[in-house]
Amino acid sequence: MLKIGLTGGIGCGKSSVAKVFEQLKIPVIDADEIAHQLVAIGQPALARIRQVFGADVLNPDGSLNRKTLRELIFSDLQQKQQLESILHPLVYQSIQAKLKLLNAPYCIICIPLLFETNMTNLVNRILVVDCSVETQIERIRKRDNMAIERIQSIIDSQVSRTFRKAHANDLIDNSETDDRLAEKVKKLHNLYLSISAGRDKIVCE
């Protein structure tokens, strides 16, 4: 099965692109969703996070206080690396397990930190969703009511736009909020179906 890695900077619109693929009946594996499930109450990863970062990162009901943890890791690189060492191997294992259950011409694996976590070996092609840094900041500010300085620190912690675009097999410019996004995704959908059919033919021969 052809595996497409969907990535892009924060606020670039990866979720919107993933939704269009889902509407086209293409399976989407979302690394962020997996990470959320891994830190649910009762999960071993949450217990490990509490052990490493202390009880302050938990809400009174025992759930993860994402805002507190986010503030912690984006102000301390070492803390960020510690969190990644807990979660990333588990996310990788879960993606692999989900892939084994799929039967489709191709699938989308949405990994926001595809390059940063060295998960490019998981996929056959890389689809980058791109927009300007100014657009990223404006979207996140409106969506999450986050301070511009914090948004900028998150952007700075990710690989650059230039790097992503240089390593993309396919690129969607999502700078404008318009109805052409579905059209762009549909073109890629047809391309991926074609590539998948070609791969199947080679295997059969």
Image (cartoon, helix red, strand yellow):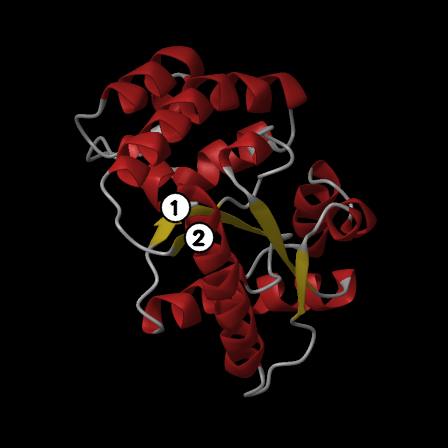
Asked if one can make out residue 201 in the rendered structure from this viewpoint, the answer is yes
Residue 204 x, y percent position in the rendering: 39, 46
The image shows residue 78, relative to residue 128, as above or below, that is above
Cβ atoms at labels 1 and 2 below 8 Å apart: yes
Q: Is residue 108 in sight in this rendering?
A: no
Residue 9 in the image, given as x and y percentages of width and height: 64, 52
Towards the viewer: 76 or 24: 24
How many residues crowd around disc 1 within 10 Å: few (fewer than 14), some, or many (20 or more)?
few
Counting from the top left corner in percent of width and height, residue 110 is at 47, 49
The kind of residue tagged 2 is Lys
Count of marks overlaid on the render:
2
Q: Residue at x 52, y 58 (%)?
A: 195
Residue plotted at (28% across, 31% down): 97
The residue beneath circle 1 is 204
Task: From the top left corner, tell me how far across and down residue 114 is, in percent.
Answer: 58, 39
Mark 1 to mark 2: distance in Å? 5 Å
**Which element type, helix, strand or loop, lies under badge 1?**
helix
| Three-letter amino acid code at the position of disc 1 | Cys
Residue appearing at x 41%, y 28% in the figure: 92
Secondary structure found at label 2: helix
Q: Is residue 175 left or right of residue 192?
A: right
Q: Residue furthest top?
A: 51
Write down the quadrant of residue 41 in the picture: top left
* Picture residue at 55% right of the left edge, 67% below the top: 191
**Which residue is denoted by mark 2 in the rendering?**
201
Placement of the C terminus among the 4 image quadrants: top left
